[in-house]
Image (tube, rainbow, N blue to C red):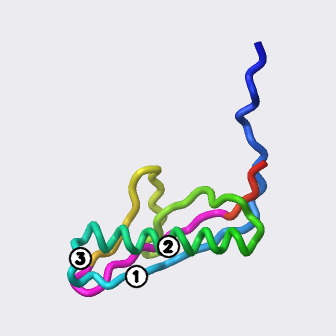
Amino acid sequence: MHWPSVIKQVRKLDTVSSSRKTNGSNKSDEDACFWALQSALATLQDAAKKADANAVINIASVDQRDLYKDTEKFQCRAGLVVSSVALRGDLAHVD
């Protein structure tokens, strides 16, 4: 029996960062953080498209230059007025 190869060729192109903020008023901390996360992820996606990359890999939260890597969680600074999320990821082409 032949198993299809699951190992892909990954060619890293560049590392990019995105820091996005959202108005925190009239939103719970969780809602405001998810709005900021969606905006930061969209920015990474736009950067990938512009660089002719088809993936963003190794996405991590950035806080005061410290990286927080977790496949299910992210860091957010939630305040009374503004909430922000900063991400860093590698643009890549995955074959």
Residue reaching furthest to the top? 1
Which one is in front, 35 or 8?
A: 35
Classify 10 Å Cα crowding around label 2: few (below 14), some (14-19), many (20 and above). Answer: many
Residue marked by disc 1: 21
The amino acid type of the residue labelled 3 equals Lys
Task: Please report whichever mark, 3 or 1, sits nearer to the chain's N-terminal start.
Answer: 1
In three-dimensional space, the C-alpha distance between marks 2 and 3, rounded to whole angstroms, equals 18 Å
Residue marked by disc 2: 40
Seen at 61% across and 68% down, the residue is 45
Q: Is the magenta stretch mostly helix, strand or loop?
A: strand
In three-dimensional space, the C-alpha distance between marks 3 and 1, rounded to whole angstroms, equals 13 Å
The amino acid type of the residue labelled 1 equals Lys
Classify 10 Å Cα crowding around label 1: few (below 14), some (14-19), many (20 and above). Answer: many
Residue 80 spot, x, y in % from top left = 21, 83
Question: Closer to the observer: label 3 or label 1?
Answer: 3
In magenta segment, residue 33: no
Residue marked by disc 3: 27
Left or right: 38 with respect to 52? left
Location of the N terminus (image quadrant): top right
Left or right: 5 with respect to 69? right
15 up-or-down from 20: above or below: above
Which one is in front, 43 or 85?
A: 43
Residue 46 spot, x, y in % from top left = 63, 73
